[in-house]
Amino acid sequence: FFFKQKTAYEISRSDWSSDVCSSDLFPSHDIRNHPNLLKTICLKRKEQVFVSDITYIKTKTNVCYLSLVTDAYSRKIMGYELSENMNAENVVKALKMAVKNRTTHLPLIHHSDRGLQYCSEVYQKVLVKNKIKPSMTDGYDCYQNALAERINGILKQEFLIYKCKNIQDLKQMVKESIYIYNNKRPHLSLKMKTPETIHKKSGKSISSGLVF
């Protein structure tokens, strides 16, 4: 399986769940940008590539922001953080959880859009500390981070469909939803297996079934 077989440039709009891009919320900037490493990479195993994104979820009282870090191979959500703002200090908590949940120490790429949170010093320091190589979209094209956007869409359209009273209730719903997503929801792209099942199969390729 190659990213270039169906990259973010080629994925059709019907396959992509439209959502907010963190890069859409800020003006253009030139700090700590990195090239897109996923154009020709061969995806062979878990914890080879993490994809990250931020989406918004409304409660009855305010708007909250859910940061996700997902394993591109297994589709498992490795880390998440729900907060009332998109400060880098909150967004990086999802990355720290993902790092903590790793089961290998093999080379890892972290892919995201060019939102200020991902370009921030606090976020980049965690990547450097854990020897994770950063990758970013070219400019502000959400389609170049299509898998992360897709995971956002699945959670919001299939699990987080009720408007909670407040952030405390929403945090519990997010926790339960991510557990069900990882452990109970089969994916067609994973040959009808769950992300957790695939993630446990270390080194066992299912490349013929993986598509974006």
Image (spheres, grey):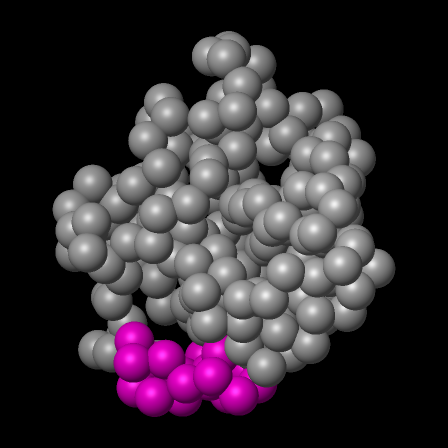
Percent x, y for residue 75?
A: 46, 69
Residue 201 covered by magenta stretch: yes
Percent x, y for residue 154?
A: 44, 65
- Horizontal side of residue 125 vs 39, given as left or right: right
- Horizontal side of residue 96 vs 143, given as left or right: right
Is residue 149 positioned above or below 70 on the image?
A: above
- Along the line of sight, which residue is nearer the eye, 60 or 43? 60
Is residue 164 positioned above or below 178 on the image?
A: above
Q: How many tags in the picture?
A: 0
Is residue 100 positioned above or below 195 on the image?
A: above
- Along the line of sight, which residue is nearer the eye, 26 or 51? 26
Residue drawn at x 19%, y 56% is 14
- The quadrant of the rendering that contains the C terminus is bottom left
- Horizontal side of residue 43 vs 40, given as left or right: right
Percent x, y for residue 136?
A: 44, 34
Residue drawn at x 54%, y 66% is 161
Q: Quadrant of residue 104?
A: bottom right
Residue drawn at x 68%, y 66% is 174
Percent x, y for residue 171?
A: 76, 62
Residue drawn at x 83%, y 59% is 168
Q: Quadrant of residue 3?
A: bottom left
- Horizontal side of residue 139 vs 195, given as left or right: left
- Along the line of sight, which residue is nearer the eye, 167 or 101? 167
Is residue 32 positioned above or below 97 on the image?
A: above
Residue 100, visible in the rendered structure: no
> Magenta segment, which residues?
183-204
- The quadrant of the rendering that contains the N terminus is bottom left
Residue 141, visible in the rendered structure: yes
Q: Quadrant of residue 9?
A: top left
